[in-house]
């Protein structure tokens, strides 16, 4: 089994009375992670799956008495796919407040559903963590740095979903199944979108425009949607852990872009499945996009797995001077320019370095990326 970066963080939170909420994409390995640490749970353990109709029915109108009966002699309660259960926040609150010595761990693949249902009821009663597809660092610790560097081009094409990583030869079939079966499941189930074909067109358009400046009006024209609906759909895709926005960084210069954003996919393989494009790296014209998306997503996983706080941005001026990616950690700015070719003479924009002279700046390429993606 591949050890996950947040495994030990979760283990440290098992002894207190707060609920643990684990959010992340479907098929990212949330249930597998809990199985890995199950031996550390207070025994016995009850597993409730929100995808099961009878479980949803039993928990629909929770009371302390009913929950005590359902829990019985169990000391730990795992609620998988918790976003599918009505009143899940109230349910967890009743357990943590009224039933002593019970640890609740809930997983969810849909941030917008679970967050809406738990934030208010569970104020001060929960630890919240994210689990993404496997990271470069996790795979290095599972195999070796040499092996993962050898596999880099493969990862750029097929990504890091656990089943994809552990099923060599079946990557394309698994990714296509993942895209067709799970990609829109949460969104279509809860939002009751009337035109799913247009949502699919939007995801494809975002895949082609990955790492580029996004125009809601332009996307709307491509997909037959108005700009407000485009924004709503992108928000849903973010909260279902399919894509995420990188906002523009603006502090000093008048001509810095302020309201623009770029789109990135949580996983390269899923992005390539959306547009059915798995050609080798040497036959592609989007390798720069794949490399930038890979590095920025891996950096996000690194920060998450090590519980490091940093706001994440890109930087660009009206004159099109730009920096691919930067982090602001309590006022300390670190800038990254992504270059696929390690021999290319990449530099950080002089306009940026003049505006932010204290910023730490890096050119990141395949030969040195591991320096920024692994704990020293």
Image: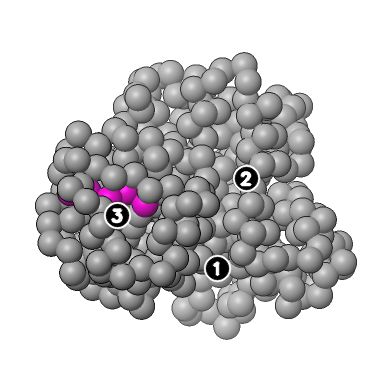
- SS for tag 1? strand
**The magenta stretch spans which residues?**
75-79
Find disc 2 in the rendering and name its residue: 182
N-terminal of the two: label 1 or label 3?
A: 3
Question: In the rendered image, which quarter is residue 101 located in?
Answer: bottom left
- SS for tag 3? helix
Find disc 3 in the rendering and name its residue: 70
Q: In front of the other: label 2 or label 1? A: 2
Quadrant where the C terminus sits is top left
Residue at left offset 55%, top offset 68% = 247
Task: Answer left or right for 227 relative to 259.
Answer: right
Find disc 1 in the rendering and name its residue: 247
Does residue 115 appear anywhere in the picture?
Answer: no
N-terminal of the two: label 2 or label 3?
A: 3
Residue at left offset 64%, top offset 48% = 183
Q: CA distance from mark 2 to mark 3?
A: 30 Å
Do the residues under discs 2 and 3 have CB atoms within 8 angstroms?
no
């Amino acid at each position: 089994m591949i050890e996950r970066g947040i495994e030990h963080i979760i283990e440290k939170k098992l002894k207190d009375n707060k609920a643990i909420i684990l959010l992340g994409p479907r098929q990212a390995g949330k249930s597998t992670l809990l199985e890995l640490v199950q031996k550390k749970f207070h025994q016995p353990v009850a597993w409730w799956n929100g995808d099961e109709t009878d479980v949803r029915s039993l928990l629909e109108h929770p009371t302390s008495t009913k929950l005590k009966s359902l829990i019985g002699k169990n000391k730990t309660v795992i609620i998988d796919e918790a976003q599918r259960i009505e009143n899940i926040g109230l349910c967890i609150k009743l357990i943590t407040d009224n039933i002593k010595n019970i640890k609740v761990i809930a997983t969810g693949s849909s941030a917008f559903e679970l967050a809406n249902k738990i934030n208010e009821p569970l104020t001060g009663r929960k630890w919240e963590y994210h689990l993404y597809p496997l990271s470069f660092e996790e795979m290095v610790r599972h195999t070796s740095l040499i092996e993962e560097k050898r596999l880099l081009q493969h990862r750029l094409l097929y990504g890091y979903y656990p089943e994809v990583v552990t099923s060599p030869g079946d990557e394309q079939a698994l990714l296509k199944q993942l895209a067709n079966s799970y990609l829109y499941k949460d969104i279509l189930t809860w939002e009751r979108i009337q035109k799913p074909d247009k949502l699919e067109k939007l995801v494809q358009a975002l895949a082609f425009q990955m790492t580029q400046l996004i125009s809601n009006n332009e996307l709307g024209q491509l997909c037959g949607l108005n700009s407000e609906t485009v924004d709503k759909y992108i928000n849903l895709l973010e909260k279902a852990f399919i894509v995420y926005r990188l906002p523009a960084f603006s502090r000093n210069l008048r001509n810095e872009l302020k309201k623009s954003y770029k789109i990135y996919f949580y996983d390269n393989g899923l992005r390539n499945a959306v547009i059915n494009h798995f050609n080798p790296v040497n036959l592609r014209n989007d390798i720069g996009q794949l490399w930038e998306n890979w590095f920025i997503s891996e950096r996000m996983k690194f920060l998450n797995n090590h519980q490091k706080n940093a706001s994440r941005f890109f930087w660009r001026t009206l004159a099109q001077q730009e920096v691919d990616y930067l982090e602001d950690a309590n006022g300390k700015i670190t800038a990254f320019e992504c270059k696929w070719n390690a021999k290319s003479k990449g530099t950080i924009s002089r306009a940026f370095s003049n505006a932010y002279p204290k910023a730490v700046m890096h050119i990141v390429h395949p030969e040195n990326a591991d320096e920024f993606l692994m704990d020293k």
